[in-house]
Image: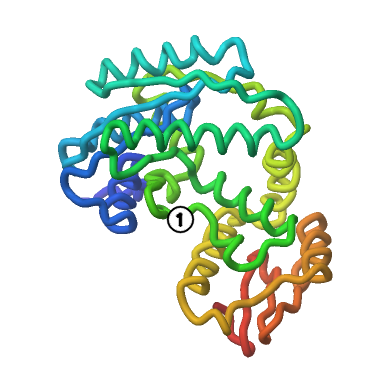
């Protein structure tokens, strides 16, 4: 008698989020969490997952949406988000801001959004604010920081928990999120600015990241691992942390724009950042870390 071989399936989005909240965010019982919900795919999936996990993890949830005053469709998108939140038993509030168009628009909008979220969290007595950043967001941010010449502390971005911020999806992939939305038939909105190549993140997402993925299919995992390592360095011996100067950043830009095995960048303190066997690695004294 023969038996069918067991098929290994990747963990569900809910499983990944629960593990992240328990093990990496170390969420305590009765944590009061404010969810940042825009109506987009990521935040709507987070709203559903967090509401499903609330009783099991002992979370008190509420949600907050921000209209930056930049798009006419934003109020309707928040209407959909509010209706979905209330159907899940999660209270929903919103704020209307006025972010004027101009330079550094995304950075100014982000700062205004977090100010609104923290103000609402204070009103509710919430301990944490949860955002729906995922692994691709983190990888893109690492590349953006590298291209701008950030050092180790700037590269160690978007950890699962930082101060009052929780990122339950940071170990999940975008495909996990989209699969969850389809499986549970969750409606979401698309922000057209996500396709606007005027923004660096969009160019990194649709240009540089795709080129890197063609050379290294595991680039998302490698960049997330690099961010984790830089966080460890930042929390440890600062004398051992690598540094990036202008020459190193320029070389890294060349490496990323035309990735080839064997290319490497010398950092201070004997550290080397290298593209080897289609992986970005950090070396010290001849050992891969």
Query: Image quadrant for the C terminus?
Result: bottom right
Q: Quadrant of residue 86?
A: top left
Specify whether residue 5 is in view. no
Image coordinates for residue 251, horizontal then vertical, percent: 82, 67
Instruction: State the count of labels.
Output: 1
Query: Residue tagged by mark 1?
Result: 159
Rendered view: 63 above or below 143:
above
Q: Nearer the viewer, residue 196 or 212?
A: 196
Specify whether residue 286 is in view. yes
Image coordinates for residue 50, horizontal then vertical, percent: 29, 35
Q: Residue at x 45, y 55 (%)?
A: 159
Q: Quick one: which residue is furthest to the bottom in this view? A: 285
Q: In this image, 86 relative to 275: left or right?
A: left
Q: Residue at x 72, y 71 (%)?
A: 244
Task: Specify the color scheme.
Answer: rainbow
Rendered view: 65 above or below 280:
above
Image coordinates for residue 167, horizontal then vertical, percent: 41, 46
Q: In this image, 65 relative to 250: left or right?
A: left
Image coordinates for residue 15, horizontal then vertical, percent: 30, 45
Q: Nearer the viewer, residue 270 or 104?
A: 104
Q: Quadrant of residue 68?
A: top right
Rendered view: 275 above or below 193:
below
Q: Residue at x 78, y 65 (%)?
A: 249
Q: In this image, 219 relative to 261: left or right?
A: left
Residue at disc 1, secondary structure: loop
Q: Residue at x 68, y 86 (%)?
A: 270
User: What crowding class fits label 1: few (fewer than 14 Cα within 10 Å), some (14-19), or many (20 or more)?
Assistant: many
């Amino acid at each position: 008698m023969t038996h069918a071989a067991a098929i290994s399936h990747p963990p569900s989005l809910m499983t990944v989020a629960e593990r992240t909240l328990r093990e990496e965010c170390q969420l305590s019982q009765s944590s009061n969490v404010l969810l940042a919900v825009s109506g987009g795919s990521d935040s709507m999936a987070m709203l559903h997952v967090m509401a499903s996990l609330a009783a099991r993890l002992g979370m008190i949830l509420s949600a907050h949406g921000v209209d930056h005053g930049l798009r006419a469709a934003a109020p309707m998108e928040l209407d959909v988000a509010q209706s979905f939140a209330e159907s899940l038993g999660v209270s929903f509030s919103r704020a209307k801001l006025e972010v004027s168009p101009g330079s550094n628009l995304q950075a100014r909008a982000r700062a205004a959004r977090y100010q609104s979220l923290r103000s609402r969290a204070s009103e509710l007595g919430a301990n944490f604010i949860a955002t729906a950043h995922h692994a691709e967001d983190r990888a893109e941010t690492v590349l953006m920081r590298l291209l701008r010449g950030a050092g180790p502390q700037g590269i160690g971005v978007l950890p699962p928990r930082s101060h009052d911020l929780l990122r339950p999806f940071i170990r999940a992939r975008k495909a996990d999120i989209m699969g969850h939305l389809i499986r549970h038939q969750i409606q979401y909105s698309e922000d057209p600015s996500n396709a606007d190549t005027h923004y660096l993140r969009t160019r990194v997402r649709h240009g540089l990241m795709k080129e890197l993925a063609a050379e290294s299919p595991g680039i998302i995992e490698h960049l997330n691992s690099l961010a984790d390592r830089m966080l460890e360095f930042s929390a440890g011996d600062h004398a051992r942390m690598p540094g990036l100067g202008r020459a190193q950043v320029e070389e890294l830009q060349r490496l990323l724009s035309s990735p080839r095995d064997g290319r490497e960048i010398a950092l201070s303190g004997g550290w080397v950042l290298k593209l080897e066997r289609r992986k970005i690695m950090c070396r010290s004294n001849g050992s891969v870390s």
